[in-house]
């Protein structure tokens, strides 16, 4: 038996790309087919046809009144994710750097993390009359702990040898943070941002349903009242698309800011 | 060789211990006393765990002694290092910041000193050229070989214009051919810059090549023996063999002492 194996020619780049796209699309295609089949046997209130859902998506995207509701929700999410970075990064840094800060703040952050989103919604409805404040508060309360713990983990995982190197040049505390800590922790802040986009998408609708007269939550509430399942699904698909686009945007920014890391997918 | 040279570093009855989590104390430095003259090249050899790196931490002010004192140019080390960049350290691993280019890594010490950006980048590029990395000034550490990264590490140490360089097993992680070239380049640069350096190494031949005096340490760090290395000794095989045998003898003696003490 020969030990020599004839190597198969490497598939072309185009073919590999096509296979990748096919793999990504196939599960959704199967799901869509199953849904469309179900729509033939069940009333539209349960399984509207794909055509009806597409018509509603088109209506949302081409009608300013509806599109503006989506943009309001998107802006709320974006603001909350950014604000949670502004609040969470310094807290995470402080907890990672100073044991006293960690001891004091950790129980508070854990407590906040343990409060369910719906409870926050009810609390803010009682606390605040301003709608935007209500929604921002709920989202920030859910996003900040994620940022804090991601940044904290970043600080704690920094290579002690790099710290020694920077300190051996006589770096002050501020220089240490600026030259070593922050560049190192940036990747953890990006991870927190990506996690928080998911958090914000899941939570913003709940907050809007209960506490806001504008936004996708309000539109979903209206659709629910008239049993318009096609509209509910249209908004749902738009929300998912927005979340995916936001995550891709953050990933693109991450690749640019952390370009020194190269493309990790090439390593395999 | 250093009879007329003023004392640069004086270490007197230095002691340092660490408390373990279990509560016990580990002695790192025991009654250590020695001088290093200005422009002298001192190599320190000794067993692993002889507190050599702890001694370097103390010289950089990163750790303080339990008792005894370290003076540089006659002033306490804490005062000497207040002006940044007077002592530089070259580590065993390159310890380059992966997000910075070679130029920015070399300029790091200068940035900490507060040197303006244009000036520090120019000086960094000069030092990269001096260590043979002229064409790689904008390369990231991930794009460089181990030898290139260690050259960048050396350039970073020289760039701050230090009076003293501490080499912490700086060539031990490299293959022998690269290490040989880097030792030679380092020696040439150190002579040109007229500086004092201390090198901790496990390689006796490296100590003979780079040092003008070799200190044999026991564990915990204490001076067991010292050997003067005459000028040109590293080119004389008989002389190298003699010094090597002498150092090996004293390392084995210090090892027996340690095991007896244990």
Image (cartoon, rainbow, N blue to C red):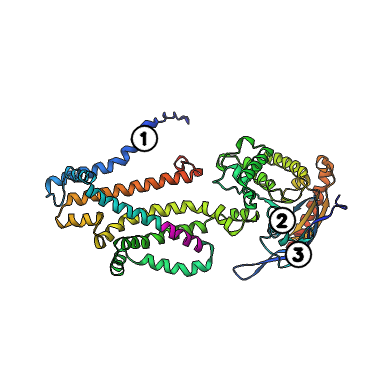
Magenta stretch holds residue B75:
no
Assign a secondary structure to mark 3: strand
Q: Position of residue B236 (x, y in %)?
A: 83, 40
Residue at mark 1 shares a chain with residue at mark 2: no
Q: CA distance from mark 1 to mark 3?
A: 67 Å
Our reading of the magenta stretch's main secondary structure is helix
Q: Quadrant of residue B16?
A: bottom right
Q: Which mark is residue B69?
A: 3
Question: At 29% from the left edge and 62% from the top edge, which residue is drawn?
Answer: A131
Circle 2 packing at 10 Å, graded few (<14), some (14-19), many (20+), is many
Q: Position of residue A109 (x, y in %)?
A: 42, 66
Question: In this picture, is B29 found above or below A250?
Answer: below
Q: Chain of mark 1?
A: A
First reached walking from the N terminus: tag 2 or tag 3: 2
Q: Which mark is residue B47?
A: 2
Question: At 35% from the left edge and 63% from the top edge, which residue is drawn?
Answer: A137
Assign a secondary structure to mark 2: loop
Q: Chain of mark 3?
A: B
Can residue B199 be seen in the rendering of this structure? Answer: no
Q: Chain of mark 2?
A: B
Residue at mark 1 shares a chain with residue at mark 3: no
Assign a secondary structure to mark 1: helix
Residue highlighted by disc 1: A17
Horizontal relation, residue A139 to residue B62: left or right: left
Q: CA distance from mark 2 to mark 3?
A: 24 Å
| Foreground: disc 1 or disc 3 | 3
Magenta stretch holds residue A94:
yes
Q: Position of residue B125 (x, y in %)?
A: 64, 40
Horizontal relation, residue A183 to residue B55: left or right: left
Magenta residues, start to end: A84-95
Q: Quadrant of residue A26?
A: top left
């Amino acid at each position: 038996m020969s030990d020599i194996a004839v190597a198969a020619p490497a598939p072309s780049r185009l073919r590999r790309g096509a296979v990748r796209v096919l793999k990504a699309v196939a599960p959704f295609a199967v799901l869509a087919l199953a849904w469309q089949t179900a729509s033939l046997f069940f009333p539209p209130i349960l399984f509207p046809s794909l055509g009806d859902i597409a018509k509603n998506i088109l209506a949302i995207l081409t009608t300013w009144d509806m599109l503006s509701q989506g943009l309001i929700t998107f802006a709320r999410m974006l603001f909350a994710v950014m604000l949670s970075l502004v609040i969470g990064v310094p807290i995470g840094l402080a907890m990672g750097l100073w044991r006293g800060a960690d001891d004091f703040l950790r129980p508070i952050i854990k407590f906040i993390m343990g409060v369910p989103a719906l409870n926050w919604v009810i609390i803010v409805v009682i606390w605040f009359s301003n709608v935007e404040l209500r929604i921002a508060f709920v989202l920030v309360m859910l996003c900040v702990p994620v940022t804090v713990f991601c940044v904290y983990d970043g600080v704690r995982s920094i290579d002690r040898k790099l710290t020694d190197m920077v300190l051996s040049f006589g770096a002050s505390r501020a220089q240490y943070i600026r030259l070593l800590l922050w560049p190192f922790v940036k990747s953890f802040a990006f991870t927190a941002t990506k996690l928080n986009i998911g958090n914000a998408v899941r939570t913003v609708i709940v907050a809007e349903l209960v506490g806001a007269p504008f936004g996708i939550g309000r539109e979903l509430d209206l659709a629910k009242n008239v049993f318009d399942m096609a509209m509910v699904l249209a908004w749902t698909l738009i929300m998912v698309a927005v979340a995916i686009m936001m995550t891709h945007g953050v990933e693109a920014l991450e690749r640019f800011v952390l370009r020194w890391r190269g493309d990790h997918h090439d390593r395999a | 060789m250093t009879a007329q040279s003023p004392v640069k570093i004086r270490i007197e009855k230095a002691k340092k211990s660490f408390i373990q989590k279990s509560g016990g104390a580990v002695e790192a430095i025991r009654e250590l006393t020695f001088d290093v003259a200005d422009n002298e090249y001192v190599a320190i050899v000794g067993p692993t765990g002889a507190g050599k790196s702890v001694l370097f931490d103390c010289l950089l002010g990163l750790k303080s002694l339990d008792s005894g004192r370290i003076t540089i140019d006659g002033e306490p080390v804490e005062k000497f290092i207040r002006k940044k960049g007077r002592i530089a350290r070259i580590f065993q691993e390159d310890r380059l910041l992966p997000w910075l280019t070679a130029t920015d890594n070399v300029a790091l010490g200068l940035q900490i000193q507060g040197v303006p950006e244009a000036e520090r980048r120019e000086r960094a590029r000069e030092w990269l050229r001096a260590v043979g990395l002229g064409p790689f000034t904008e390369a990231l550490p991930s794009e460089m070989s181990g030898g290139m990264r260690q050259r960048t590490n050396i350039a970073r140490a020289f760039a701050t214009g230090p009076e003293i360089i501490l080499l912490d097993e700086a060539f031990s992680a490299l293959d022998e051919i690269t290490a040989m070239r880097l030792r030679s380049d380092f020696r040439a640069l150190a002579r040109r810059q007229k500086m004092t350096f201390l090198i901790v190494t496990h390689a006796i031949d490296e100590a003979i090549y780079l040092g003008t005096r070799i200190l044999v340490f026991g564990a915990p760090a204490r001076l067991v023996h010292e050997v003067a290395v005459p000028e040109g000794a590293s080119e004389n095989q008989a002389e190298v063999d003699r010094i090597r045998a002498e150092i090996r003898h004293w390392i084995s003696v210090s090892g027996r002492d340690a095991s007896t003490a244990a």
